Amino acid sequence: MSGSTRDLAHPDAAALELTGVLFALSDPARLEIVRRLAVAGSLEVAECQPDSGPIPKSTLSHHLKTLREAGLVRNVPRGRQRSLTLRRDDLDARFPGLLAAVL
């Protein structure tokens, strides 16, 4: 992690735990975000609102934090926005076949 105050902590691939990943995926809104990332490659935070309707910004932030702390997504600053990407390579290396089964 660099020294920027905008950088967020992301767990190392070796530290990912199956229970944490499965918990993060257990919420329908978080699962939808992961499915979108699997298709799109990357999304801006504003593009992560669920199709079922907008959720409060604080709730969306909580969902994104849960996904990041579980190791499912990487959340990095890009100008004035934040970009999310799915950590597919890390997840496939740690838990082979899990993403394919879930998605």
Image (cartoon, rainbow, N blue to C red):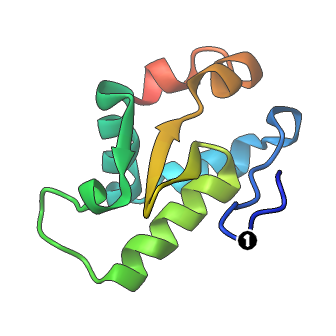
- Is residue 66 found left or right of 42 in the rendered image? right
* Mark 1: amino acid: Thr
Residue 90 placement (x, y as % from top left) = 70, 26
* Numbered marks: total: 1
- Residue at coordinates 34% horizontally, 81% vertically from top-left? 57
Residue 87, by quadrant, is top right
Of 2 and 32, nearer the camera is 2
- Is residue 91 found left or right of 79 in the rendered image? right
- Is residue 6 found left or right of 53 in the rendered image? right
Of 40 and 59, nearer the camera is 40
- Residue at coordinates 43% horizontally, 64% vertically from top-left? 80
Residue 52 placement (x, y as % from top left) = 12, 62
> Would you name the residue on which mark 1 appears?
5
- Residue at coordinates 30% horizontally, 38% vertically from top-left? 36
- Is residue 72 found left or right of 48 in the rendered image? right
As drawn, which residue projects farthest toward the front?
Answer: 79
Residue 72 placement (x, y as % from top left) = 59, 42
Residue 94 placement (x, y as % from top left) = 76, 24
Of 54 and 20, nearer the camera is 54
- Residue at coordinates 32% horizontally, 59% vertically from top-left? 29
The secondary element bearing badge 1 is classed as loop
